[in-house]
Amino acid sequence: MVPGHSEWKRNLLLVGFMGAGKTTLGGILSKRCRLDFVDTDQLITEQFGLSVADIFSRYGENAFRVAETELLRNLAARCRHSVIATGGGMVLKDENWRVMRQIGPVVFLRADEQELVERLSSATGRPLADDSDREAILERYRQRLPCYLRADLVVETKNQAPLEVVDAILGGLERVNPKWLF
Ligand SMILES: Nc1ncnc2c1ncn2[C@@H]1O[C@H](COP(=O)(O)OP(=O)(O)OP(=O)(O)O)[C@@H](O)[C@H]1O
Ligand SMILES: O=C(O)C1=C[C@@H](O)[C@@H](O)[C@H](O)C1
Ligand SMILES: [Mg+2]
């Protein structure tokens, strides 16, 4: 039993850096496990009626972080059967970790640095990556790594197709604690 998980629900949280695949894999995993799918970035954009990039530019990163924490608390109160893909910065606050641990097991999708850089360079809409070069992206990633590693399970995604990662998540949960399996 992992400390902090006293009450088991059929929830699972995905954490990881921008571009790690939380949204993509969360959608697939939720279908596979017949659970609801929740994406915190998507809910915040619906709440503001703005893209993440526009929220950052109009209201600032801190306003986004406050909304993110408030949303997480709401999800803790209402989610019972959900895969929750978090924003890449959800792991930055201790407060968020306390709430995530009440919701369910936390899985870190650990992506290869080169794959991350390629994915982030070929897409826009991520305010903390859009104007960053390779070194700045990797520096942010390396600084955050200890926060991601607080997860209950680390799943390596390097060279893994999405369906393979989903299998690895389910296999990992079964190994670490079969009670996690839905
Ligand atoms: N295992 C994988 N293999 C190949 N491509 C992947 C894999 N995981 C994700 N991708 C691709 O990487 C891109 C980023 O994935 P996704 O948007 O799911 O990341 P994210 O972790 O939700 O990022 P963010 O924190 O910015 O929301 C997408 O184009 C997705 O198709
Ligand atoms: O890593 C981050 O800090 C972020 C990741 C995205 O999911 C969004 O939550 C936003 O772009 C910030
Ligand atoms: Mg996402």
Image: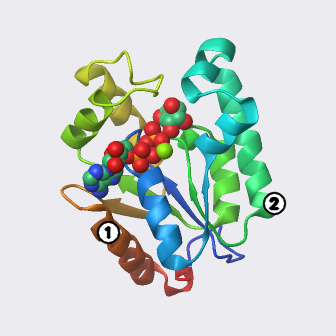
- Callout 2 secondary element: helix
Q: Looking at the figure, which quarter contains the N terminus?
A: bottom right
Q: Quadrant of residue 38?
A: bottom right
Q: Is residue 136 above or below residue 108?
A: above
| Residue at x 43%, y 83% (from the top left corner) | 174
Amino acid type of the residue tagged 2 in the rendering: Ala
- The label nearer to you, 1 versus 2, is 1
Q: Are dots 1 and 2 in contact, CB under 8 Å?
A: no
Amino acid type of the residue tagged 1 in the rendering: Leu
* Badge 1 or badge 2: first in the primary sequence: 2
The spot of residue 28 in percent (x, y) is 44, 66
| Residue at x 52%, y 78% (from the top left corner) | 33
The spot of residue 4 in percent (x, y) is 65, 66
**139 with respect to 1 (left or right):** left
The residue tagged 1 is 163
**91 with respect to 49 (left or right):** left
- Callout 1 secondary element: helix
The spot of residue 77 in percent (x, y) is 81, 60
**95 with respect to 134 (left or right):** right
Q: Which residue is at the front of the view, 24 or 113? A: 24
| Residue at x 45%, y 28% (from the top left corner) | 126
**137 with respect to 134 (left or right):** right
The residue tagged 2 is 77
The spot of residue 3 in percent (x, y) is 61, 69
